[in-house]
Amino acid sequence: MHQGDGTALIFQDDPSVFTFSMHCEVNFPGTKQKSDLDVPLAEGMEDDTYLQTLAAYLPDLLAQVKPDLVLYDAGVDVHVGDRLGKLALSDRGVFCREMQTLSTCISKAIPLLA
């Protein structure tokens, strides 16, 4: 739901690390850091649109970057029940996000740490 701004800042000058963030465009932090790839999401986005967006980016990104390892840090602040979040994923949507990410990495034989 919010940008991984700390991660983006820490690795902004490190060419050995590629940072990718999908986050609500109108939520914390107000001033975003620059990830290698930022995908701003519309407020109120629900399961299907979120998962389609992830599918539109992740496989091609992994093929392009060819990472040795994926460090996957994703919170549940995308959940519709999160009072501070501005996205609207259901329990099923959060589960599908995890499975989609894991299966995409596994299908490309990329180790993943979550």
Image (tube, rainbow, N blue to C red):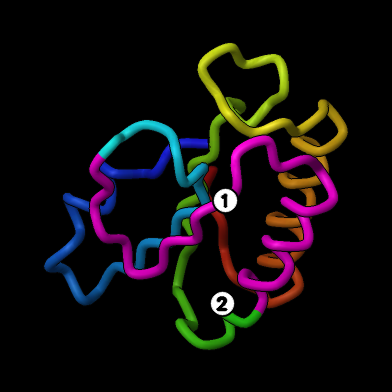
Q: Secondary structure at mark 2?
A: helix
Q: Earlier in the sequence, mark 1 or mark 2?
A: 1
Q: Residue at x 45, y 73 (%)?
A: 68
Q: Is residue 32 magenta?
A: yes
The amino acid type found where label 1 is placed reads Leu
User: On the rendered structure, is 107 left or right of 84?
Assistant: right
Mark seen at residue 103: none
Task: Estimate how packed mark 1 is, as few (under 14), some (14 to 19) or many (20 or more) residues with alpha carbons within 10 Å.
Answer: many
Of residues 1 and 63, the one nearer the viewer is: 1
Q: Which residues are magenta?
A: 31-59
Q: In which quadrant is the C terminus drawn?
A: top right
Q: Name the residue carrying label 2.
A: 62
User: On the rendered structure, is 89 left or right of 24?
Assistant: right
Q: Residue at x 64, y 33 (%)?
A: 87
Q: Secondary structure at mark 1?
A: strand
Q: Name the residue carrying label 1.
A: 41
Position of residue 74 measured from the top left corner of the image (x, y, whole percent): 54, 39
| CA separation in Å, label 1 and label 2 | 20 Å
Of residues 106 and 62, the one nearer the viewer is: 62
Relative vertical location of residue 82 with respect to residue 89 in this rendering, above or below: above
Position of residue 38 measured from the top left corner of the image (x, y, whole percent): 42, 61
